[in-house]
Image (cartoon, rainbow, N blue to C red):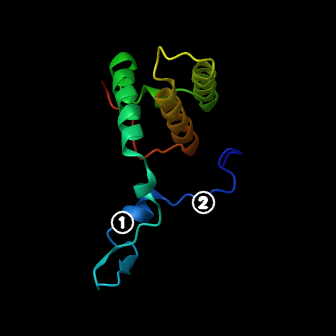
């Protein structure tokens, strides 16, 4: 675990989506798998904006190319986008690029081997 993720508990995806995952029964008696993370807190419009940047990047560099780039390089680009936005530059969607680069850095740091780079 890196310093960036130290102290954060990550549940393996398999534990969350497994067919035999823990079940939860609500006050009405409805039963379903328990989800221990808060997907409902993600902003939909921000995700659409980030995914538009991901789409453009996949067309330009190839899908999943980001997995072949080091965390430090992702963070350097993230910082560049942050400073560009803070300097008042609005010629690019810097905030969505920051979201992408943060996700890329975290994905590379977690070294998720369950998703492999596919041929483009």
Q: Is residue 41 left or right of residue 2?
A: left
Q: Nearer the viewer, residue 89 or 24?
A: 89
The answer to whether any part of residue 117 appears in the image is no
Q: Which percent across, then down, holds residue 4? A: 67, 44
Residue at the spot x=29%, y=84% of the render? Answer: 28
Residue at the spot x=46%, y=30% of the render? Answer: 96
- Examine the image and state in which quarter residue 78 appears: top right
Q: Nearer the viewer, residue 45 or 24?
A: 45
What residue occupies the far front of the structure in this picture? 88
Number of marks: 2
**Local secondary structure at mark 1:** loop
How dense is the environment of label 2, judged by Cα within 10 Å: few (below 14), some, or many (20 and up)? few
Q: Which percent across, then down, holds residue 70? A: 59, 28
Q: Which residue matches tag 2? A: 9
Estimate the spatial distance between the alpha carbons at disc 1 and disc 2, rounded to whole Å. Answer: 18 Å
How dense is the environment of label 1, judged by Cα within 10 Å: few (below 14), some, or many (20 and up)? few
Residue at the spot x=46%, y=23% of the render? Answer: 93
Q: Considering only order in the chain, which callout, 2 or 1, is on the residue closer to the N terminus?
A: 2
- Examine the image and state in which quarter residue 38 appears: bottom left
Q: Which residue matches tag 1? A: 18
Quarter of the figure with the C terminus: top left
**Local secondary structure at mark 2:** loop
Residue at the spot x=33%, y=31% of the render? Answer: 118
Closer mark to the observer between disc 1 and disc 2:
2
Label for residue 3?
none
Q: Which percent across, then down, holds residue 30? A: 28, 80
Q: Which percent across, then down, holds residue 36? A: 47, 66
Vertical relation: 34 (above or below) 116: below
């Amino acid at each position: 675990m890196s310093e960036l993720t130290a102290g954060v508990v990550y549940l393996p995806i398999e534990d969350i989506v497994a067919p035999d995952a823990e079940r939860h029964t609500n006050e009405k008696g409805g039963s379903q798998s328990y989800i221990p993370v808060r997907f409902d807190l993600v902003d939909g419009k921000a995700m659409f904006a980030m995914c538009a940047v991901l789409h453009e990047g996949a067309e330009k560099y190839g899908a999943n190319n980001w997995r072949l780039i080091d965390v430090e390089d992702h963070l350097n680009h993230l910082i560049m986008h942050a400073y560009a936005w803070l300097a008042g530059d609005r010629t690019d969607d810097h905030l969505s690029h920051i979201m992408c680069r943060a996700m890329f850095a975290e994905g590379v740091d977690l070294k998720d081997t369950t998703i492999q780079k596919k041929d483009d």
